[in-house]
Image: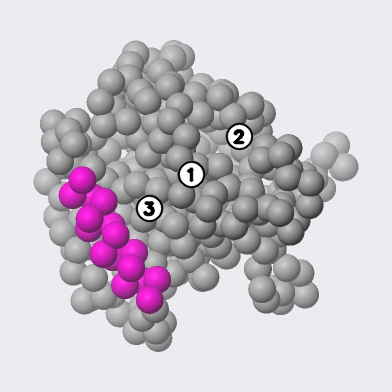
Amino acid sequence: MEKFGFENEENRRSFEEQFREREAIKTDGGKVDTIDVDLGSPDKVPVLMAPAWGCTMNVYEAAIKQLAEESSEPDDKGNKKEKRRVISLDYARFGGSGTSPAEAVEEYPEEEIRKAKAILGVLKEKGIEKTDAITHSESAINVIMAALVEPEKFRNIVLFAPAGLIGKDTFTRLVKGFSGQFKGRAGVESMSTIPVTETEKKVGAVAGKEGAKYFAKNPLRALKEGVAISNSQIHEALRYLHGKDIGVCVISGVDDPVFPMKRLQKIVKADMLDGFLSVRGGHGAVGEHPEHYIEAAKGMLAAMENKQVKNSLVG
């Protein structure tokens, strides 16, 4: 409420107005553009929406709106999902230090360290002491690294189609996986019962446009980021964070060609996660159908929060 200086709900700016407003923030991970959307959430922990490799915040407009707004329909228990303040960012295409901020992340590639530092810089600048997070693809690596450095900043994390969790990988295999994603619905049999929506069409078009811009701004950095993704493993980091009482859940599409669910299931163990949800769809489903997958992520965040509250009462 104080952020925009408004005194009542009627005067609060719309989602579209807040989404269009970008704030540039200088971080150790480079200068990044950010958004900060709050449609009148109660005193809830904000949610960080972290974008995938080659994607910008524009790709996730519908997903961020789904996160920020109160759900119109109650869940099976009669409860409506509450509004949430949502923070997101576009990673820097130039500048930023890759020097490791803590010994805990020295094993990770410079490109991933830079993005983790950008996330932590945004949280610091915004004065956010604690956040939940929803990651997509590569940003699983970035957010988990940020949580290794400053675990006190993170409460619960949902990893959608996460990178770094399929075991030994190569850049060639990664590129082949992404090429499968570019085929759209072809081969994504599990989506046959989900109607094609205007959001799905728009996200596909925006992702192609924004991805081209992302790579064109700094092709060498984009290439290094891709190699870094294939060289990063986060399963031991998940085990460590789980031991620190940071909730972590995974959502994986059964037809994800980039990070196949069957390979994920071979790597993740019960001592790393609070939950694993398999869903219909491919790698980009979280942006294409937020009415399903963002709601699923919100449900997982709520379940982890409830578990932590119960544990604190018992303790």
Of circles 2 and 3, the one toward us is: 3
Q: Which residues are magenta?
A: 198-213
Give how far apart the Cα atoms at labels 2 and 1 are.
25 Å
Q: Disc 3 residue type?
A: Asn
Magenta segment, principal secondary structure?
Answer: helix
Mark 3, mark 1: which one is toward the viewer?
1
- Establish if 154 lies above or below 176: above
**What residue sits 43% from the left and 22% below the top?**
26
From the viewer's perspective, tell me whether residue 230 is left or right of residue 161. Answer: left
Q: Which mark is residue 21?
A: 1
> What is the crowding at mark 1: few (fewer than 14 residues within 10 Å), some, or many (at least 20)?
few
Q: Which residue is denoted by mark 3 in the rendering?
A: 58
Residue drawn 25% across and 26% down?
Answer: 94
Residue 148 lies, with reference to residue 58, above or below; the image says above
Residue located at (40% from left, 48% from top): 57
Residue 261: percent from the left, percent from the top?
36, 60
Assess whether mark 1 and mark 2 are in contact (beta carbons under 8 angstroms).
Answer: no
Which residue is under mark 2?
154
**Of callouts 3 and 1, which one flags the residue occurring earlier in the amino acid sequence?**
1
Residue 75 occupies which quadrant of the picture?
bottom right
Give the x, y percent position of residue 37: 58, 47
Q: Is 21 located above or below residue 12 in the figure?
A: above
- In the rendered image, residue 48 lying in the magenta stretch gets the answer no
Q: Residue furthest front?
A: 11
Amino acid identity at mark 1: Glu
